[in-house]
Amino acid sequence: MNKDEMLSFYDDELNELGITLRSEIHSKGFLHKVVHCWIIAEECNEKWIYFQQRSYDKKDFPGLYDIAAAGHVDVGEEAEVAVIRETKEEIGIEIDSKKLRFVGSIREKMYLDNFDNNEICEVYLYPMENPKFELGHEVEKMVKISFGEFKKWIIEGSENIVAFSMDSKAKFILKSEEFCAHKKEYLELVIDFMGKMKLIK
């Protein structure tokens, strides 16, 4: 399902070195840019984080759970434009740029089963009230996890994560291995940012 689009790649000082196919960037471990959009909402005086389950048809990490929306930055595209585009395409959310919060640029480099993932993640957080998702073909479903549960998972290393479905509100357990891998330092930065953020009233 992943199209083999053209992407820019960079040196460690983020000087653009050229443009090549996505497949080559991943096979050779070239540094490239992606955007991540974390969606957070308030319900019953608790912060809730929304995660997507990736389509089972995806080439990479099919069926795993991940950040609400994420994707590559197109050639010549600004990161904020990319995060607005990806969030609309994947989960149908129209982002108001005035409410979008920039968390930071985070380097993630991991050797995975089928490619060398070397990314600069432009990370954003988007607060919402009662989000209504319209899922694109890349997403199976959305689930929500309380901020407290998410923090316990990342900080304490809990293997079982309590999640809730969006349709029936049913509670169920996810295992840590059912999520896409991210560096702990990255997730701790997101937790810190979320913890300091005031809830929407």
Image: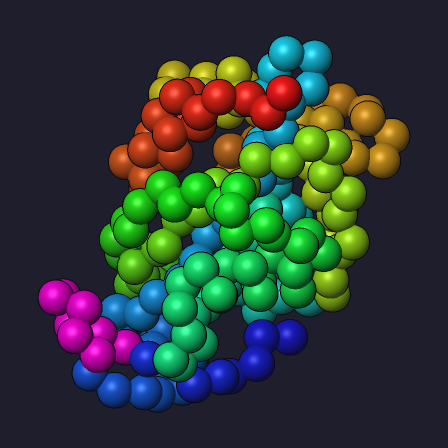
Image check: 41 left or right of 16? right
Farthest front residue? 98
Q: Tell me residue 122's x, y (percent).
A: 36, 54
Image check: 40 left or right of 14? right
Number of callouts: 0
Quadrant containing the N terminus in the rendered view: bottom right
Quadrant containing the C terminus in the rendered view: top right
Q: Nearer the viewer, residue 197 or 156?
A: 197
Question: Does the rendering let one see residue 111?
Answer: no
User: In the rendered image, which quarter is residue 47 located in?
Assistant: top right
Q: Nearer the viewer, residue 164 or 194?
A: 194
Q: Residue at x 51, y 83 (%)?
A: 4
User: In the rendered image, which quarter is residue 111 located in?
Assistant: bottom left
Q: Residue at x 42, y 21 (%)?
A: 195
11 part of magenta stretch: yes
Image check: 190 left or right of 135? left
In the rendered view, how is the structure colored? rainbow
Q: Tell me residue 53's x, y (percent).
A: 66, 48
Image check: 13 left or right of 54? left
Q: Tell me residue 171's x, y (percent).
A: 75, 22
Main SS, magenta residues: loop
153 part of magenta stretch: no
Q: Tell me residue 135's x, y (percent).
A: 75, 56
Question: Does the rendering let one see residue 177?
Answer: yes
Q: Residue at x 31, y 61 (%)?
A: 119
Q: Nearer the viewer, residue 95 or 154?
A: 95
Farthest left residue? 13
- Compared to 90, does 96 lie above or below? above
Farthest top residue? 45
The magenta span reads 9-16
